[in-house]
Image (cartoon, rainbow, N blue to C red):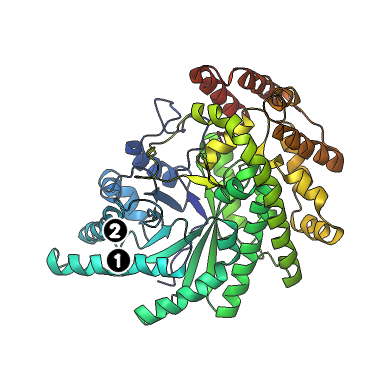
Amino acid sequence: MTQRKFPTIMGTQHPDNANAPFWDASQQPFISAYNEMNEAFENFSELNVDEYMWDWEGKHADAAVIDRLFSTEYDYFKTNQIGRDKFLTFRFPNIWEEKGYSLMQAMTAILSSEDFAHDLGFDQRPLFEAILPMAQRADQLLEMQILFEKLANFKSVEFTKTDKNTPYIEMIPLFEDFNTQLHAPEILKEYLKLHEEHFGFRPKYLRVFLAGSDSALTAGFMSSITGNKLAIARLHEFAKEENIDIYPISGTGSAIFRGGLSPHRIDRYVTEFPGVRTATVQSAFRYDFPLADVQQAITELKEKLPNAEPLKISANDQKILAEVAEESARFYADTLDQLIPDMQPIFKAFPKRRDRRQHVGVLGYSRSVDGIELPRAINFTGSFYSIGIPPEFIGFGRALANLNADHLSVFVRNYPSMKKDFRELAGYINLDALEILKTQSPAWAEVEQDIMTLKAIFNLEIGPHNREQQQHAEIALQVVQIKDGAPVATTALINRMAQLRHFLG
């Protein structure tokens, strides 16, 4: 399927929206699993996204999604065929990290959707690739393909003898932490070898997904943005070496901490991450800005991303950036460990936007740093913004000041938007709130040091720059003052702040 269309825009179900979706008549920001089918259609038809991620990882998912889409919107999908013009891509559960109850359900849905599309006279099967989250090793990708192959062959023999299912699925590894992103080429080289041994051929291309959120959550913003850049550059090098086409997907939210892709920052995104071939537009991107702005931004991304000259980083600079990321992660983790107890009431009061499985360890899973359980990245990011401390600052100031001249020069050259980013972020800081927090844990003084260091380096104006940020700062102070009280009041304040900054987390 080498002549396929490669998606530039992937809509996702990340629950980072502050406002209700434009398509929801009830105007509720919470999106139920039942409404996600309608959401997928609206994303295709109104926003013109190329691809929509259907998430089975740690959450409820509707297995009948293709049946429902084809049944309710037949005319649209007869013209805009899924698998040819538009793409619906399952994110499988990772059976090495969570119970695999829904994996067989997801795989069966892929097979039955092929039958249904065939009966309707469509050209090709609608679902032919899937994402493996938290991918660590090459053998995991092949194991998914072997499981699918066995299930497809079993179904063809035992259940649908007249309609043979295609016993092959393409896998998209999702690399979420710094190490797997840095070593993606090595993992993929091993995967190509295993794939050829089992199937007798090499894939014509690979799509590779790089997370922006979880790497920031676990290692800090400096490490995360550095890791993403290294991975993009190294993947394109690997593509040349192996003579294989590689299409990197970048998982980024609207918060700068989570990648910074919003309708008002398209040029910044293309400047920072050239070589990304598919961008994720998450819920905040789609629902927290005027619809016309969102549509225009998607059009702009479609023009600019496919042809952007990929990021090139010399071998020496790669080595330096890997050291920068490692050093910065230490500053971040040492401070974060001490802040987490103070943040628990905020994490608990954080508003929900999707049907996610909550009983971690049985059906879902959580992230942890040094054994301390953390919330999901959106909750984490939004919680820090809600107390007037953008998490981008944690560890960043001290790490930047600690770099020697060579390391600093390489880092600055490879992060051209740094000064502009922190000037924007400074508008969300509330120093009065920070004074109260410092009485609760001495680690907040380290965050203050990060802020003041960056203020001096970039000549930042700390505190609100406009009316929205002024309101945001006032509410942040209230949140800090009442955070140990009733969570209902805190939740309401967090919701209001999210609307002011155009993302929940």
Name the one closer to the observer, 479 or 309: 479
Kindly state the secondary structure of the residue where label 2 is placed: helix
Q: Is residue 270 above or below residue 292?
A: below
> Considering only order in the chain, which callout, 2 or 1, is on the residue closer to the N terminus?
2
Mark 1 surroundings: few (<14), some (14-19) or many (≥20) residues within 10 A: some
Residue topped by disc 2: 107
Kindly state the secondary structure of the residue where label 1 is placed: helix
Judge left or right: residue 481 versus residue 446: left
Q: In the image, what residue type sits under mark 2?
A: Met
Q: Is residue 267 visible?
A: no
Name the one closer to the observer, 120 or 175: 175
Nearest to the eye among marks 1 and 2: give it.
Answer: 1
Q: Is residue 309 above or below residue 422?
A: below
Question: Residue 123's quadrant in the figure?
Answer: bottom left
Judge left or right: residue 454 versus residue 71: right
Name the one closer to the observer, 486 or 371: 371
Q: Residue at x 67, y 36 (%)?
A: 390
Q: Is residue 205 visible?
A: yes
Residue topped by disc 1: 147
- Count of residue discs: 2
Residue 41 at what x, y percent from top left? Answer: 38, 44
Q: Label 1, label 2: how many angstroms apart (C-alpha)? A: 9 Å
Residue 225 at what x, y percent from top left? Answer: 66, 53
Q: Residue at x 29, y 58 (%)?
A: 107
Q: Is residue 145 above or below residue 261?
A: below
- The reply to whether dot 1 and dot 2 touch (C-beta < 8 Å) is yes
For the N terminus, the quadrant is bottom left
